[in-house]
Image (cartoon, grey):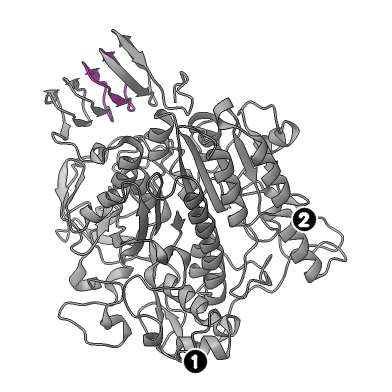
């Protein structure tokens, strides 16, 4: 379960609020907690706790400037994997933190390295380092450091689902824009049901990276038959058993509205073609899904539908929700749970110094604010409702399931520097976690289930020591509206005198809470190195990396965490042979002949016109942008077609393609 943007300080703010509701009358941070796991939220009761690094890659473009948003390809073609390799690129495993939010280092200045990395000297060994709170500043510490080269939700989700480091914007692809096998796909190929649940649009970065492989997170949906977008891949190729969240066209109206005009529908997250087709064919459609959307008594309708579906019979469910005026997101709850901020555009303001809140709802003619809020709550399930419905469907699969639940609006609240909505969205996410824990305890317990709760990235929030006292006397709404950092008890960014000093992510490690079957793997990964593009990368001394969270999930599905750590990985040009073991092979920019040899291999054809001999073993092969020929010998092989012509010479092989039901599909 992923709290989008739920760094350690965000979790603490919500935990303090909950402790106050439970009767804690403490006035300072030390009366609650100042380090470690903390208490107050349901996931803080899980037995495992760690911190995780979240950084991605940084690559120099043709201009010589490193950027976290660059893949290893040029930008000459917007199609995924459609551009050639950047001239001279070779992956360098060195750390390169850069100097600006997006990177900024230059080759002309001697900068090198394609991993951002995390420096515990400059950023602090822990998120609660005293230097962030006016305490002693260790030699080398720099408050500005965690602002540089921060990750986004696309690249972090890609690492969480695949174990592969990638660039900001990457949706399920590596730095060469080649598709990766996600944990969702691995689970489906193991015969398990899968699910994606979110409080934001279903084709946003966090759900999208589990069930799509495109080079840019903004490729939401285009009309069929185009596949180079997230939603069509979710619905037509990877097909999670359950796909529930926001993005309904009615949730993104213009604001304010002319008198007498019904809110228009905005097809940002779902194309008009896709939406109208699903509306007209809710139970018998080309996607094979039962379709639900916002409407009267939505939570009850969702629960009843979930109860009627059986994944063992091939049933699948997609739900498209979202409150009017909220950019595709579910109704937002403030800290006190009254939903009084529902319909206000608090998700894209990105406060700087001074209050910039939206106070205009897209009301229908004659509709009051109270009627608006009541309707939006009635016509949309909560994240908890979505989670319970997903568990109801997936829990019927006798072979088990993999499920991701995202509290995506936590991130939007943090971007807005809105402490009231931050606490409210955190509590909504925690309610979903609570229901999940209850489901686990009623369905086999912790010996048969694994739960991991973490964040994809951090935000730069600091609570002042007077925060608990102010929260009790003034309330979270008032603390949001106060512009003075001291009087508000919190500030965003590095300057304690500027409340709205930073509206973006940070590169600081995030918390991981976990328990259940196979979770010991994660404990054992603390402080250990990990593998990236064939290189051993130094680990985080007191925590893990998101690569290792993936490995822990992989162990829960397959029994082994080792797929992402493979000896013999190589980037090759010319004619080369793999080793007899399990290899990850990346071809270069030229015409290559690859003999993967025995073992279960992953072969990335990338650029050039390549000839690949897979030999014995269960191989996973990705055709690239050239005209490739595959000779697939013994084993169960998976092949994904690239942008150009691909031919297959099958010798005693079973062609197995990436689709939930393992049907024959080229993608």
Q: Is residue 56 left or right of residue 221?
A: left
Q: Is residue 307 left or right of residue 364?
A: left
Give 388 or 356, whichever is nearer the viewer: 388
Task: Establish if 28 lies above or below 85.
Answer: below
Magenta part of the chain = 606-632
Residue 446 percent coordinates (x, y): 40, 50
Task: Establish if 214 lies above or below 610.
Answer: below
Q: Is residue 630 magenta?
A: yes
For mark 1, does the 10 Å Cα neighbourhood hold few (<14), some (14 to 19), or many (20 or more) residues? some
- Element type where label 1 sits in the image: helix
* Res 526 quadrant in image: bottom left
Q: Which mark is residue 263?
A: 2
Residue 560 percent coordinates (x, y): 26, 38
Task: Establish if 423 lies above or below 499.
Answer: above
* Res 213 quadrant in image: top left
Name the quarter where the N terminus is drawn.
Answer: bottom left
* Res 646 quadrant in image: top left
Residue 64 visible from this viewpoint: yes
């Amino acid at each position: 379960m992923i709290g989008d943007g739920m760094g350690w300080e965000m979790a603490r703010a919500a935990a303090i609020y909950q402790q106050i509701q439970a009767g804690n009358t403490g006035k300072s941070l030390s009366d609650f907690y100042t380090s470690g796991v903390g208490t107050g939220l349901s996931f803080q009761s899980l037995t495992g706790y760690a911190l995780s690094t979240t950084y991605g890659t940084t690559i120099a473009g043709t201009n010589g400037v490193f950027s976290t948003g660059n893949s290893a390809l040029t930008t000459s073609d917007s199609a995924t994997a459609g551009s050639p390799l950047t001239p001279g690129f070779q992956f360098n495993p060195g750390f390169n933190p850069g100097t600006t939010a997006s990177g900024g280092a230059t080759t002309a200045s001697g900068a090198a390295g394609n991993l951002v990395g995390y420096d515990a000297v400059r950023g602090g060994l822990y998120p609660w380092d005293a230097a962030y709170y006016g305490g002693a500043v260790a030699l080398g510490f720099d408050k500005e450091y965690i602002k540089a080269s921060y990750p986004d939700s696309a690249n972090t989700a890609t690492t969480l689902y695949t174990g592969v480091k990638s660039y900001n914007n990457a949706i399920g692809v590596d730095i060469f824009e080649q598709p990766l096998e996600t944990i969702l796909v691995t689970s489906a190929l193991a015969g398990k049901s899968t699910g994606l649940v979110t409080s934001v649009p279903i084709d946003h970065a966090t759900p999208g990276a589990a069930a799509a492989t495109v080079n840019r997170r903004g490729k939401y949906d285009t009309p069929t038959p185009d596949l180079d977008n997230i939603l069509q891949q979710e619905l037509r190729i990877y097909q999670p058993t359950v796909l529930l969240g926001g993005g309904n066209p009615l949730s993104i109206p213009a604001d304010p509205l002319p008198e007498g005009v019904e809110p228009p529908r905005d097809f940002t997250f779902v194309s008009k073609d896709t939406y109208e087709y699903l509306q007209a064919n809710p139970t018998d459609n080309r996607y094979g899904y039962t379709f639900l959307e916002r409407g009267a008594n939505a939570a009850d309708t969702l629960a009843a539908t979930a109860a009627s579906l059986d994944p063992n019979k091939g049933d699948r469910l997609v739900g498209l929700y979202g409150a009017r005026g909220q950019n595709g997101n579910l109704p937002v709850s403030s800290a006190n749970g009254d939903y009084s901020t529902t319909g206000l555009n608090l998700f894209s303001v990105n406060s700087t110094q001074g209050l910039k809140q939206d106070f205009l709802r897209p009301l229908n003619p004659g509709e009051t604010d109270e009627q608006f809020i009541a309707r939006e709550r009635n016509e949309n399930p909560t994240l908890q409702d979505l989670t319970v419905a997903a568990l109801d469907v997936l829990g019927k699969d006798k072979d088990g399931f993999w499920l991701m639940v995202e509290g995506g609006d936590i991130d939007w609240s943090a971007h807005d520097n809105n402490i009231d909505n931050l606490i409210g969205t955190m509590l909504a996410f925690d309610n979903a976690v609570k229901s999940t824990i209850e489901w686990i305890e009623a369905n086999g317990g912790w010996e048969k289930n694994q739960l991991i709760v973490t964040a994809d990235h951090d935000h730069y929030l600091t609570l002042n020591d007077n925060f608990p006292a102010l929260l009790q006397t003034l309330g979270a709404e008032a603390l949001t509206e106060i512009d003075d950092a001291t009087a508000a008890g919190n500030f965003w960014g590095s300057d304690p005198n500027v409340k709205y000093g930073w509206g973006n992510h940070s590169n600081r490690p995030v918390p991981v809470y976990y328990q259940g079957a196979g979770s010991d793997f994660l404990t054992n990964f603390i402080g250990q190195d990990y593998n990236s593009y064939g290189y051993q990368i130094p680990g985080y001394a007191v925590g893990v990396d998101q690569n290792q969270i993936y490995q822990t999930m992989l162990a829960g599905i397959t029994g082994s965490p080792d797929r992402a750590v493979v000896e013999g990985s190589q980037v090759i040009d010319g004619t080369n042979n793999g080793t007899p073991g399990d290899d990850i092979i990346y071809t270069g920019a030229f015409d290559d002949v690859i003999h993967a040899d025995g073992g279960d291999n992953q072969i990335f054809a990338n650029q050039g016109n390549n000839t690949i001999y897979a030999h014995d073993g269960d191989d996973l092969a990705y055709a690239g942008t050239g005209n490739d020929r595959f000779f697939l010998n013994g084993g169960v092989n998976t092949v994904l077609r690239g942008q150009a012509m691909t031919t297959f010479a099958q010798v005693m092989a079973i062609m197995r393609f990436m689709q939930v039901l393992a049907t024959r599909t080229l993608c």
